[in-house]
Amino acid sequence: MANELKNKLQPVLEKAWYGKTGLTQLLRPLSWLFIAIVSVRRLLYKLNIKKPTKLSVPVIIVGNLTVGGTGKTPLVIWLAAFLKSSGYKPGILSRGYSGKASHWPQQVRPDADPVMVGDEAVVISRRTHCPMAVGPDRVAAGEALLKHSDCDVILSDDGLQHYALHRDVEILVIDGVRRFGNGFCLPAGPLRERQARKNEVDCMVTNGIAAQGEYSMAYHGTEVINLLSGEVRELSEMGKNTITAVAGIGNPDRFFNYLRSHGLRLDARAFPDHFHYGKDSIMVSDDDIVLMTEKDAVKCQRYAKPNWWYVPVDVELPKEFGLEIVDLLGKHHG
């Protein structure tokens, strides 16, 4: 029931957050209360009244200030590869959002069940082959990761507001189109903290066109992979007929626009972020071509038909960004 209510409210709220509706002003008093709670909580950590736990290896947080997808997961995948090439042995933490495991933390491997540990965690594990642990308590997940691996640096997918975990480097990921929406905190706007928080992080990465002081991150990927056979084709081979495009991510329009930029005609079907697909969720004939995100594919594989494909997307970043992260690690643990 709670998830159904959230799924119905989300489009209404997003219209207010990234457009102009009277709902924003009605929700402002609740935003003030939210800001007060968040500010007091953070102050407790700043004053060491509540002490963050420092792990035995440096921790890099890849987070955002807004609700919804900004591109944190592909950035974590890119960073893991860069750190490996720089001689590090990265491990990865994630919340395991939407996972239904009966206890936490959980160790994640490429063959893990996305229903148990969450879809994003499985994608990250398959793409990086790094040791990984997930759980709502990032400190417990980090300690479990160190117990079961020999990683010498930890990447946290999200967790900017999880102050119980000490961090050595903070990376803020920004949606280049949506930016910070109307600039208000929840529920009147999309912000989890005040916008001024961006001035305290070590690096800012923008998914799209970057502003001054930000690194630009661009998507690329022209291949599609069949969910059943693993066959690889070029995106341009998908034909000129209308294709059913499926996305259950934080910002589905980003995926749909990416496909349209490659000349595809779409029947676009957006689902809520972290949607749990069933066998009847995507109603198409056996001959229809379906394109989806990699995050959706890990959950749809058991229901897939012969013409269901996913689009693995990588990101490109300036090498200078990776070098700055390595330099920051050296300063903290030189």
Image (cartoon, helix red, strand yellow):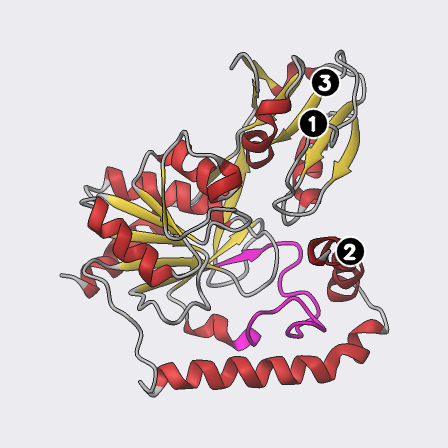
Q: Could one spot residue 281 in this view of the protein?
A: yes
Element type where label 2 sits in the image: helix
Q: Position of residue 313 (x, y in %)?
A: 53, 33
- Give whichever of 161, 207 is nearer the camera: 161
Residue under the point 72% across and 85% down: 29
Q: Position of residue 142 (x, y in %)?
A: 30, 56
Whether residue 32 sits left or right of residue 166 in the image: it is right
- Give whichever of 222, 137 is nearer the camera: 137
Density class for disc 1 (Cα within 10 Å; few <14, some 14-19, many ≥20) is few
Whether residue 319 sits left or right of residue 274 in the image: it is left
Residue under the point 55% across and 83% down: 37
Residue under the point 23% across and 63% down: 55
- Give whichever of 301, 81 is nearer the camera: 301
Q: CA distance from mark 3 to mark 1?
A: 16 Å
Q: Label 2 amino acid?
A: Pro
Q: Check the image and name the residue furthest to the front.
A: 102
Which residue corresponds to mark 2? 11
Q: Nearer the viewer, mark 3 or mark 1?
A: 1
Element type where label 3 sits in the image: loop
Residue 121 covered by magenta stretch:
no
